[in-house]
Amino acid sequence: MTTSLRAIAPEFLKLRHSTIVWVTFAAFALGPVMGGLSLYLLGHAGDMGSSPLSEKAKLMNFSADWPSYVGLLTQIVGVGGVVVFGFVASWLFGREYSDKTAKDLLALPASRSSIINAKFIVYAVWCIALVVANLLLGLVVGALMGLDNFDVSVITSTLTNYFITTVLVMLLGTPVSFMGIWGKGYLAPIGLVVLMLIVSQIVGAVGLGQYFPWSVPGLHSGISAEMKASLSAVSFGLVGLVAVLGYLASHWWWNQADQN
């Protein structure tokens, strides 16, 4: 077994015996279900009357069809993913500190860098599994609702946007991971996620969301067509820069800090 596999295997084993994995899937699945219900009520407003959910969908310029529903799923990833993926990173990188077992990781027959890389790999797999599960659930919900306008070319374009948004949100997990190691627990990384969400709302309100990394995934998901058009190479470059800095900082701190 290679050094990397020696580090990865225990991480997946911890997931296997943890209920938190299913909690994240259940929490993330609320998006497709509630979104599907909103579009269903919107499409049957004449028969069932208006509702808060259908009115909300109408305000967001949605209609009861496949392009709107997949677009809604993308927005769920762009906004809700920041919270859920941030929680995943907080748990993966802060759990051992809260359980007082961080020093036990050093007993593994693997280098410190391999241990951190293993956690990032598990983070990526976990996040991808979440968005794929949501997409599959969304397909089932959409089929049950009998949504209209299933056009392969339109759906393919929307799905491309869905997965690009996913990657953008995943990249923002590296600073959260660093905060888990630096803060030695859950509180600091979760606090960072909450703070960034608040700041992204403020920055977005003044029209500068395209220059704030935590606003970029939401804008790219299509929450605002006008703001999405304002995204540039600089916007995506800032997300990449934050991701690289978070990754390097995580490695540096883990390799230098005393884990006792």
Image (cartoon, helix red, strand yellow):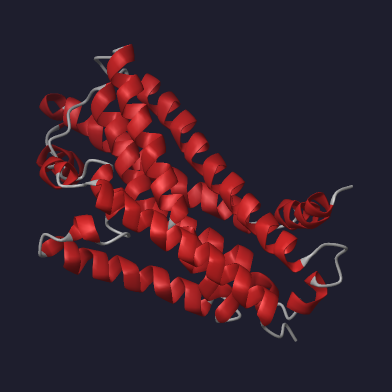
Q: Could you say which is closer to the camera, residue 48 or residue 119?
A: 119
Q: How many marks?
A: 0
Q: Quadrant of residue 183?
A: bottom right
Q: Is residue 102 left or right of residue 76?
A: right
Residue 104, position in %: x, y?
Answer: 82, 74
Residue 157, position in %: x, y?
Answer: 31, 24
Residue 79 seen in render: no
Q: Could you say which is closer to the camera, residue 188 or residue 1?
A: 1
Q: Is residue 218 left or right of residue 59?
A: right
Quadrant of the drawing holding the C terminus: bottom right
| 47 is higher (above) or lower (below) than 194 | above
Picture residue at 31% right of the left edge, 59% below the top: 213
Residue 132, position in %: x, y?
Answer: 50, 35
Picture residue at 25% right of the left edge, 70% below the top: 199
Q: Quadrant of residue 254?
A: bottom right
Residue 138 seen in render: yes
Picture residue at 10% right of the left edge, 43% below the top: 226
Q: Is residue 63 left or right of residue 197?
A: left
Residue 112, position in %: x, y?
Answer: 74, 68
| 227 is higher (above) or lower (below) than 149 | below
Picture residue at 39% right of the left edge, 48% below the top: 168
| 1 is higher (above) or lower (below) than 138 | below
